[in-house]
Amino acid sequence: MTQTRKAVALISGGLDSMLATKVILEQGIHVEGINFYTGFCVEGHTHAIRKKDKQKPKRNNALWTAEQLGIKLHIIDIVEEYKDVLLHPKHGYGANLNPCLDCKIFMVDKAKQWAEEHGFDFIITGEVIGQRPMSQRKETMPVIAEESGANDRLLRPLCALNLPETLPEREGWVDRSKLHGFSGRSRKPQIALANQYGFEDFAQPAGGCCFLTDPNYAKKLGDMWQHQGNKNYELDDIMLLKVGRHVRPNDRFKLIVGREEGENNFLSGYRKQFTYLKVKDVAGPLVLLDGNPNEEDIELAARITGRFSQGKKADSLNVSVTKPGQDEFIINTKPMGPSEIPEEWYV
Ligand code: SF4
């Protein structure tokens, strides 16, 4: 009796890993997925917070993909281990703070370890040569295979025909003639294959799979590191960088201003850890204050809080300020005018 071979697929929640997995499932291989949670993932989280995105389905795309494919998905939290990848990338960063090549090597390595522990034969990814400038180039494909230690147990079904044969092909577990030779940045071959399989409503994240490729996010992360004097971070820190308008009037403090109801609700979960401000009597944002402000800074923070409220044109407003573990106090102040907030304060 022929043995059913098993593959583990890296599932990002995007179309490519979905197609790569389907191609292998079609060959009778048993496939299970792994999704690595770094804390910087785009999908699900932000859409779940922001009310304005409420028409978008609030789903975890990796889970949704697995459901569409009918495979088991293992979500693995790598938040702690990922810090070393982000802070010390051997191959450097892409256009922003994205250590894509080191990230891929790390994830394939983790998947390889998982495969060994669970009796799986090979690893598949949705990589396509030339699709992404940093990690998906012809020269980087062997680097990922070698440095992860996966070597020829790493199969990329969407571009396999442009690469040397891998173990699953040589051993006949997978029929190479049924794999693909996609390359380049065009998404047309993937869309055509998705249509062929009848996939609809798949996720096509514009900026890649994580916030580290987003220039605005990278700027906020860089600002946080600069002001705290080191590159440490906790999950809460990187979550808060995804939310609200960030305003830094000076080196002593920064404000995180909720932009809508969903963000205000999310930020209110941090009221015990941060000083927070809110206008009284009229609608306005919840504002978290991060840093070590002096008395003048608190007054300035109250004026900025007023600026983003419904009372922004009033001559004066009552703004409540609550420090962690203390009772609120009220500052009566004039909201700042829009032109009084310099552009460089916006992180
Ligand atoms: S975009 Fe983010 S998750 Fe994707 S490879 Fe780059 S660093 Fe890793």
Image (cartoon, grey):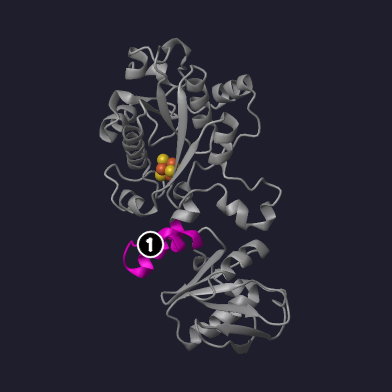
Pinpoint residue 29: horizontal percent, then vertical percent. 46, 21
Whether residue 18 can be seen here? yes
Residue sitting nearer the eye, 204 or 295: 204
Pinpoint residue 134: horizontal percent, then vertical percent. 38, 37
Q: Residue at x 42, y 13 (%)?
A: 176
Quadrant in the rendering for residue 330 = bottom right
User: Is the residue 317 above or below the residue 137 in the image?
Assistant: below
Disc 1: CA contacts within 10 A as few (<14), some (14-19) or many (>=20): some
Residue 221 within the segment the image draws in magenta: yes
Which region is colored magenta?
A: 219-240
Residue sitting nearer the eye, 215 or 77: 77
User: Is the residue 171 above or below the residue 50 in the image?
Assistant: above
Q: Residue at x 31, y 33 (%)?
A: 116
Which SS type dominates the magenta stretch?
helix
User: Is the residue 311 above or below the residue 178 in the image?
Assistant: below
Pinpoint residue 1: horizontal percent, then vertical percent. 40, 11
What residue sits right under mark 1 in the picture? 233
Secondary structure of the residue carrying numbered label 1: loop
Give the residue type that dot 1 points to: Tyr
Quadrant in the rendering for residue 4 = top left
Q: Residue at x 64, y 48 (%)?
A: 58
